[in-house]
């Protein structure tokens, strides 16, 4: 059974600081997704990582994938309050990687 | 292009009643997925459907839960004789056929409360 672990689960940081969220998974996959969820809202797709070594950046967020280590990272640069949300990684499995297994999420709070 | 639509957004049921959750995928999407999110947890896969077919229901509880995606109309997740433990947010996602990255687009969710 595929297991996905995120850490930390809670992250409180000051504006302007940098930090990294880690996502480890237990079995081989080459499909990894990062989502953002605001309280009471749906999931917003941030990044789709499809191959070993993939790196994607959008604004202050950068995601990378190491399929050999079964590890993805979400790096936050110079955090701002608007980034406060819960961030989930999800790993694809099944014939076309359709079955997403989610981590428990990282609740990020950015303080002024 | 409207996103994934779900209704109702909030649903309150008493124990023993039935809950019906509806999901209309994005235009052009023929694959639908249902996930359940318990408080403070990530989403858990329940079922994957294509039009008139259940492809994978390995995440569905064996009893009381069923799902369908008819040729016409929305996908329905049906929960019979609800219990308090069914209280959760239920999210539907859709994807287009043969998508290279199989990116799934999520609806706003239905928050089910069982009294």
Image (cartoon, grey):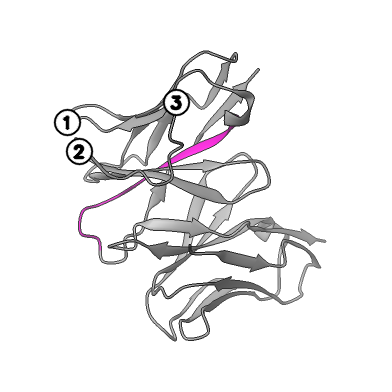
Q: Nearer the viewer, residue B57 or B102?
A: B57
- Compared across the picture, whether A47 is left or right of A111 comes to left
Residue placed farthest to the front in the image? B62
- Chain containing the residue with disc 3: B
Location of residue A30 by image quarter: bottom left
Q: Check if residue A104 falls in the magenta segment.
A: no
Question: Residue at (47%, 16%) from the top-left corner?
Answer: B18
- Chain containing the residue with disc 1: B
Quarter of the picture holding the N terminus of chain B: top left
Q: Nearer the viewer, residue A19 or B41?
A: B41
Residue B107 seen in this snapshot: no
Per the image, the residue denoted by label 2 is B51
Q: Check if residue B98 falls in the magenta segment.
A: yes
**In the figure, B96 relative to B66: above or below?**
below
Per the image, the residue denoted by label 1 is B71
Per the image, the residue denoted by label 3 is B64
Please state the extent of the stretch shown in magenta in the rendering: B87-99
- Mark 2 vs mark 3, foreground winner is 3
Q: Could you confirm whether marks 2 and 1 are on the same chain?
A: yes
Q: Earlier in the sequence, mark 2 or mark 3?
A: 2
What x and y, as percent, mark residue B24? 32, 33
Tell me whether the residue at label 2 lies in contact with that at label 1, contact meaning CB atoms closer than 8 angstroms: yes
- Marker disc for residue A28: none
């Amino acid at each position: 059974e595929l297991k996905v672990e995120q850490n930390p689960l809670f992250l409180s940081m000051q504006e302007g600081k940098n930090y990294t969220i880690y996502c480890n998974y237990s079995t081989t996959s080459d499909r990894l997704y990062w989502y953002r969820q605001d309280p009471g809202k749906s999931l917003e797709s941030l990044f789709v990582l499809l191959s070993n070594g993939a790196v994607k950046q959008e604004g202050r967020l950068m995601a990378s994938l190491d399929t050999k280590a079964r590890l993805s990272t979400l790096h936050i640069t110079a955090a701002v309050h608007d980034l406060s949300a819960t961030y989930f990684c999800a790993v694809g499995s099944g014939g076309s990687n359709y079955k997403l297994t989610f981590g428990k999420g990282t609740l990020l709070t950015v303080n002024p | 292009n409207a996103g994934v639509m779900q209704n109702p957004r909030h649903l309150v049921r008493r124990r023993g009643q039935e809950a019906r959750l509806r999901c209309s995928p994005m235009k052009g999407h023929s694959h639908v997925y249902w996930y359940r999110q318990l408080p403070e947890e990530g989403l858990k896969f329940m079922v994957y459907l294509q039009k008139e077919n259940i492809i994978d229901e390995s995440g569905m509880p064996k009893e009381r839960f069923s799902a369908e995606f008819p040729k016409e109309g929305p996908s329905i997740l049906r929960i019979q004789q609800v219990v308090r433990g069914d209280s959760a947010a239920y999210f539907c996602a859709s994807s287009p056929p043969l998508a290279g990255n199989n990116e799934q687009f999520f609806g706003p969710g239905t928050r089910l409360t069982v009294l």
